[in-house]
Image (cartoon, rainbow, N blue to C red):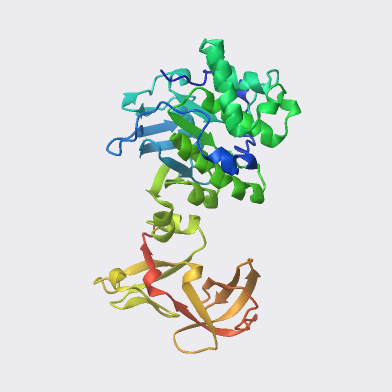
């Protein structure tokens, strides 16, 4: 039978909205440690036909508008799904409902087909990594990792063996007798994740675990977190407001807005095929062009923006909004035929040079070009022509004012 984290007071763990954990230190990427985990989870093989974690019509409000509004989401066993959205969109509340720390007003949470909506957190077979380190300050690293197993009255020998296995996995054997204040931030974070995994959870929940880290460390840790989850085969629900992090880590991303899931799909689907204007603007950089549908493109006062055959519509004259990503717009020097404008801004972004182009109508678009030596000699004020890639254009539902 699986063990779990104990049901504890929120204050005892620290605020779930404070700064948190660096989940794994760079040691985890060493070739030797990636061969196989130090212990094996007892989860059955994945079954793609059924949901391992199911969120069914869940809603929650606090004497006002719904914070979570009729959310439905299924995760297959071993799947990594990220809840992505701005602050206040309901993603952390939804995660805490899944964990059992918050009770929904309606709806159900199921794990492996079992309704756990009213099951205490300690009995849900879930591991939770808080946004803060959330380590017990009066306990050593060893005692922190062993806490759930100790509360569950597991045999001492079993507890010692599991702690040793996790310590080897995270390479913290030499730190087990230290207290949290004697550990660096990265070391505390590894201990926090080891604690979440100690009781062999069926589901791992992570609340913005990299929000306190600088960009260089975040990038390094993404692959390490994902590699760990894959090796252990744990169904994972992850919360972040960082879109790049979500795209890099996830099997699927659920974009949340005002308590609802606006769109869910693979990272590629979310980026290349956003369903709504909100998603198009939230994920990556975008150029949203409004115009009138023609049989061969999108008519605007600046000219006709091309659409691929699959995007053409028979509804001539209908208002429409199309998305063009900056990397899919070519900018050529010279005020020639077609869509034209003038370079208004130039921003160096490392591999790319981002050009801000003002069109005659007053609309401004952005286009990314390779930055190496600026071979075309772009300059502020230069007249240019704009050539969108018709094959990458996406019609989006205009759901925002």
Classify residue 30 by image quadrant: top right
Side (left or right) of 148 relative to 304: right
Nearest the viewer among 118 and 104 is 118
Residue 376 seen in render: yes
For this orientation, the residue located farthest to the left is 314
Closest to the observer, 323 or 239? 239
Quadrant housing residue 168: top right
Percent from the top left, x then y, of residue 154?
Answer: 51, 12
**In the displayed structure, would residue 247 be above or below residue 121?**
below
346 left or right of 261?
right
Asked if 119 appears above or below 105 in the picture, the reply is: above
Image point (56%, 19%), residue name: 161
Place residue 224 in its image quadrant. Answer: top right
Q: Nearer the viewer, residue 164 or 106?
A: 164
Question: In the figure, 195 relative to 398: above or below?
Answer: above
Left or right position of 118 against 193 = left
The residue at the point 52 percent across, 35 percent down is 206
Q: Position of residue 54 (x, y in %)?
A: 35, 33
Q: Quadrant of the N terminus?
A: top left
Residue 226, percent from left and from top: 50, 43
Q: Is residue 329 above or below residue 11?
A: below
Numbered circles on residues, count = 0
Which residue is most to the right? Answer: 182
Q: Quadrant of the C terminus?
A: bottom left
Front-lying residue, 305 or 74? 74
Which residue is at 65% across, 81% downward?
379
Residue 400 visible to the viewer: no
Q: Whole-percent x and y of residue 322?
A: 39, 67
């Amino acid at each position: 039978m699986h063990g779990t984290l104990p049901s504890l007071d929120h204050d005892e763990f620290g605020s779930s909205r404070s700064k948190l954990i660096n989940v794994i230190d760079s040691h985890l990427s060493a070739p030797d440690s990636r061969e196989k985990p130090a212990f094996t989870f007892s989860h059955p093989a994945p079954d793609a036909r059924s949901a391992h974690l199911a969120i069914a019509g869940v809603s929650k409000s606090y004497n006002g508008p719904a914070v979570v509004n009729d959310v439905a989401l299924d995760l297959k066993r071993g799947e990594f799904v990220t809840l992505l959205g701005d602050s206040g969109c309901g993603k952390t509340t939804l995660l805490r409902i899944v964990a059992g720390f918050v009770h929904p007003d309606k709806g159900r949470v199921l794990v492996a087909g079992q309704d756990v909506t009213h099951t205490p957190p300690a009995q849900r077979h879930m591991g939770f990594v808080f946004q803060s380190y959330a380590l017990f300050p009066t306990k050593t690293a060893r005692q922190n990792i062993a806490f759930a197993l100790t509360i569950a009255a597991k045999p001492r020998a079993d507890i010692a063996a599991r702690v040793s296995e996790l310590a080897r996995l995270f390479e913290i054997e030499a730190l087990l007798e230290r207290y949290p204040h004697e550990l660096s931030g990265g070391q505390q974070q590894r201990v926090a994740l080891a604690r979440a995994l100690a009781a062999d959870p069926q589901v791992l929940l992570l609340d913005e675990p990299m929000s306190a880290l600088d960009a260089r460390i975040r990038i390094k840790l993404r692959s390490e977190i994902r590699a760990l989850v894959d090796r252990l085969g744990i169904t994972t629900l992850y919360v972040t407001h960082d879109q790049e992090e979500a795209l890099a880590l996830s099997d699927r991303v659920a974009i949340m807005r005002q308590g609802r899931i606006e769109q869910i799909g693979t990272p590629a689907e979310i980026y290349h095929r956003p369903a709504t204007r909100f998603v198009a603007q939230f994920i990556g950089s975008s150029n949203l062009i409004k115009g009138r549908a023609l049989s061969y493109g999108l008519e605007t006062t600046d000219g006709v923006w091309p659409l691929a055959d699959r995007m053409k519509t028979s509804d001539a004259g209908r208002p429409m909004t199309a998305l063009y990503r900056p990397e899919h717009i070519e900018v050529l020097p010279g005020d020639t035929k077609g869509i034209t404008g003038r370079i208004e801004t130039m921003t160096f972004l490392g591999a790319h040079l981002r050009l801000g182009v003002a069109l005659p109508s007053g609309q401004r678009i952005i286009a990314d070009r390779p930055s190496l030596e600026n071979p075309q000699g772009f300059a502020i004020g230069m007249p240019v022509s704009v050539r969108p890639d018709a094959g990458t254009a996406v019609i989006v539902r205009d759901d925002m004012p």
